[in-house]
Image (cartoon, rainbow, N blue to C red):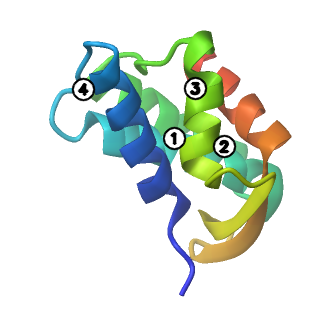
Amino acid sequence: MQQVFSDILAKALQDEALAHGHSYPEGGAQAWGKVGAAYLGFALCHLAPPTLRGIQYNTRELFGPVILECKWYDSLKQQCLGGQQSIHALLPSGGGSLMESEITADLLLEMFDFCREG
């Protein structure tokens, strides 16, 4: 059974923040994991831009900015992809369901930038 990517990303964000002396408020890492998964869903699964922006804005309003520094990207990529160049995981789709998709290292790095800028 495929993993839900937002869960993978949430764990990686939480672990990396803690490793650098930061912490998310309760539910914050999970919420930012959903933002990252929504961005990938937009890029790969036809998730509508207003849906993506709504998730992003609500998360920032409720939990503050993502705790993520550029110098953490390699470690986060390793955690999310398990040392591979890509993984298959479930992402939110335009139909409101989860869709299995291939997440590449390059797209993952693009998603990190989106989260940091949002």
Q: Mark 3 points at which residue?
A: 115
User: Split into 4 quadrants, where in the image is the C terminus?
Assistant: top right
Q: How far apart are marks 4 and 3 (CA)?
A: 15 Å
**Taking the image as drawn, is residue 62 in sight?**
yes
The mark lying in front, picked from 4 and 3, is 4
Number of other residues with Cα within 10 Å of mark 4, as a class: few under 14, some 14 to 19, many 20 or more: some
Q: What residue type is labelled 2?
A: Tyr
At horizontal 18% and vertical 27% (from top left) the residue drawn is 25
Q: How far apart are marks 3 and 2 (CA)?
A: 9 Å
Select label 4 or label 2 by which is in front: 4
Mark 1 touches mark 4? (CB < 8 Å):
no
Q: Mark 2 points at which residue?
A: 39
Residue 52 against residue 6 in the figure, above or below: above
Alpha-carbon neighbours of circle 2 within 10 Å: few (<14), some, or many (≥20)? many
Q: Tell me which label, 4 or 3, sits earlier in the chain.
A: 4
Task: Give the image location of residue 96, x and y in percent.
Answer: 57, 71
Numbered disc 3: secondary structure: helix
| Quadrant of residue 90 within the rendered picture | bottom right
Q: Residue at the location (67% across, 75% down)?
A: 99
- The numbered mark at residue 24 is 4
Relative placement, left or right, of 74 versus 30 is right
**Residue 52 at x, y = what percent?**
60, 43
The structure residue drawn at horizontal position 79% and vertical position 43%, both measured from the top left corner, is: 105
Disc number for residue 35: 1
Tag 1, which secondary structure?
helix
Q: Residue 16 is drawn in which quadrant?
A: top left
Q: Which residue is the extreme one toward the left?
A: 26
Find the distance from the CA under tag 1 to the CA under tag 3: 7 Å
> Residues at badges 3 and 2 in contact (C-beta under 8 Å)?
yes
Instruction: Name the residue type under label 3.
Output: Cys
Q: Which of 44 and 72 is in front in this view?
A: 72
Give the residue type at disc 4.
Tyr
